[in-house]
Amino acid sequence: MSLYSEKVMDHFKHPRNVGVIENADGIGEVGNAKCGDIMKIYLKIEGDIIADVKFETFGCGSAIASSSMATELIKGKPLKDALTLTNKAVAEALDGLPAYKMHCSVLAEEAIRAAILDYYKKNNLPYDPELFKERDHEHEHEGSGDGE
Ligand code: FES
């Protein structure tokens, strides 16, 4: 089957960092209204570093693979790297996603930013609101083809 790369299938079948972090420093939950998929990201932050990250995704295989890859990409990294992580970078790290599945990777990008924003707000830390503005995503609003 060539629709999905081996990496997508690997992260879908063996997702990394699944679960919950008790007393997480930041939690972000986002959903896609069209397909109904939901993603939740938990962050443990030490200093400026993402010491641990876990996710729960109620969604399609591409959303699960995207969550798994995104957590791998930000674990142990400075917050600023996680803030600038794009869905494109997540999809590229997975060796690509079909165009109509790109919105699944957008969920991962948005959930991470939501979790960081939650951390900033909980701790009354100053942050640049520009970093949390909605971004334009190609294909974001394309439906998955089922359910419409
Ligand atoms: Fe909606 Fe994948 S996240 S179909």
Image: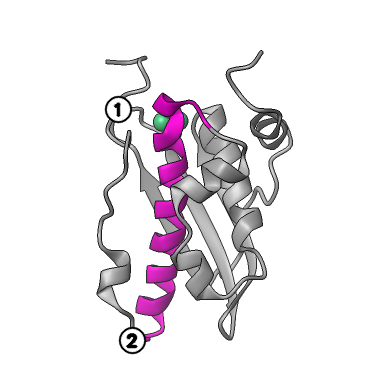
Q: Position of residue 78 (x, y in %)?
A: 57, 75
Badge 1 crowding class, 10 Å Cα cut-off, few under 14, some 14 to 19, many 20 or more, is: some
Secondary structure type for disc 1: loop
Question: Which span of residues is magenta-colored?
Answer: 97-126
Instruction: Identify the residue at image location x=28%, y=54%.
Output: 135
Is 28 in front, or is 80?
80
- Label 2: which secondary element: loop
Residue bearing mark 2: 126
Q: Which corner quadrant of the image does residue 2 belong to?
A: top right
Q: Residues within 10 Å of mark 2 (few under 14, many from 20)?
A: few
Q: CA distance from mark 2 to mark 1?
A: 35 Å
Amino acid identity at mark 1: Glu
Q: Quadrant of the C terminus?
A: top left
The residue mark sitting in front, 2 or 1, is 1
Q: Is residue 20 visible?
A: no
Ligand 1 within 8 Å, label 1 CB:
no
Relative side of 69 to 147, left or right: right
Q: Residue at x 50, y 36 (%)?
A: 58
Residue 44, by quadrant, is bottom right
* Above or below, comparing residue 122 to residue 33 in the picture: below
Q: In which of the image's four quarters is ligand 1 placed?
A: top left
**Which quadrant is the N terminus positioned in?**
top right
Q: Is residue 86 left or right of residue 133?
A: right
Q: Is residue 35 above or below residue 26?
A: above
Q: Position of residue 26 (x, y in %)?
A: 48, 69
Applied colour scheme = one colour
The residue sitting at 56% across, 66% down in the picture is 43
Residue type, label 2: Pro
Q: Between 61 and 8, which is closer to the camera in this rendering?
A: 8
Q: Is residue 100 above or below residue 86?
A: above
Q: Earlier in the sequence, mark 2 or mark 1?
A: 2
Query: Which residue carries the number 1 mark?
Result: 142
